[in-house]
Image: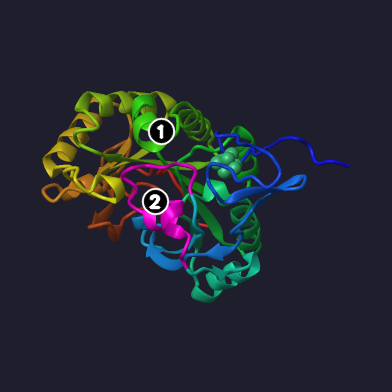
Amino acid sequence: MAPSPRITCDFCEHRCSLADGQHGICGIRVRKGDAIYTENYGEHVSLAVDPIEKKPLYHMFPGASVLSSALYGCNFRCSFCQNCSISQPELYRHLQTRYIAPDELARNLTDGGYPVAAFTYSEPTVWQDYMLDAARAIRAVGGRTAMITNGFFTEAALERMHPLIDAFNIDLKGDEAFYRSLCGGHVEPILRNIRTLAGDAAALLEVTTMVMEGEHSEDGIMELAGLLDDAGVKVWHLSAFRPAYKMTDHAPTRPEFLDRLYERITAETGIPHVYAYSRRHASYQQTFCANCGGLCIDRRRFALAENRLHDGTCPACGTPMYGVFSG
Ligand code: SF4
């Protein structure tokens, strides 16, 4: 029987419709006959151990070491990508890789005593079949899982991921014009996925936005803040752009710009946990109780300094903290 003329990949919202032998926009999903394969399934470009705060995940096992697993590939073409050597085809093609089977990844987790495996650095959406097989193996040995992602996956993909991924950090990069001009994507599917996860009590969601002064205006970031607040997002990280990839001539974001945004967002929205790295204000990295305002988790330069939570609750008033802190 002749192969069907086109098959659509449902991993991400590009929804590439592929003829036999054709690659998708990501460059790593390829149709062969009647199926679409991930060419670099299990082929790692990086396996590392990081503090969980570096993901960033601030509401999951504070101070834990996380096993970070990364294959290459991405469905976006962000001009400012901070990890372009493993995300962009013209740069990753010549990288050495090492195959790590899902069971072997799970063994690495238990051998190291790490509580969480994070799928990270590049875009796990485009290698989600490996991520989900690995997540199953990790769950089988009692581990937890996290996905650090641009959030441009389909609803069908989220249905597959949700039962196997404990924590998501989704990057919200800007508005539709920003995604169109600098990323090769669209904002609405990302907002849809953020709304779904923020409204789901069984999911842990943290959102990150890298602020690029000059491309992002203060009012533009406040519009994103309003959208996240309306979605019920509990945790938002602001980071500062550093020149990279095709934007090495763009000035880095000034610390005062980030400070000003942090101050406006905490004053003008109801998002309970907002974080920004600030040289002048250590408190911008701290976690406070959403009820009484007491200090619950102290951090210094992206690392845990003190965890005052009692079984995941505020030490002063007993209010449960949003997140995963035990088990
Ligand atoms: S993962 Fe996305 S970009 Fe890659 S083939 Fe599938 S739909 Fe296309």
Report the amino acid beneath label 1: Val
What's the magenta bit mostly, secondary-structure-wise?
Answer: loop
Residue 314 image point, x, y percent: 35, 46
- Left or right? Give the position of 247 relative to 159: left
Q: Nearer the N terminus, badge 2 or badge 1?
A: 2
The image shows residue 33, relative to residue 327, as above or below, that is: above
Judging from the image, what secondary structure is the residue with disc 2 in? loop
Cβ of mark 1 under 8 A from ligand 1: no
In the picture of the structure, the residue carrying the numbered disc 1 is 233
Quadrant hosting residue 65 = bottom left
- Tell me the number on the disc at residue 35: none
The image shows residue 194, relative to residue 166, as above or below, that is: above
Report the amino acid beneath label 2: Leu
Quarter of the picture containing the N terminus is: top right
Judging from the image, what secondary structure is the residue with disc 1 in? loop
- Left or right? Give the position of 85 relative to 281: right
Residue 86 image point, x, y percent: 43, 57
Identify the residue shown where x is 50% and y is 63%: 115
Cα–Cα gap, marks 2 and 1:
14 Å
Residue 127 image point, x, y percent: 57, 52
Asked if residue 26 lies in the magenta stretch, the reply is no
Q: Would residue 41 be seen by someone viewing this image from the given angle? A: yes
In the picture of the structure, the residue carrying the numbered disc 2 is 57
Identify the residue shown where x is 59% and y is 59%: 40
Residue 70 image point, x, y percent: 49, 60
Magenta-tinted stretch: 74-95
- Left or right? Give the position of 173 relative to 247: right
Q: Residue furthest right?
A: 1
For the residues bearing labels 2 and 1, Cβ distance under 8 angstroms? no
Identify the residue shown where x is 21% and y is 28%: 217
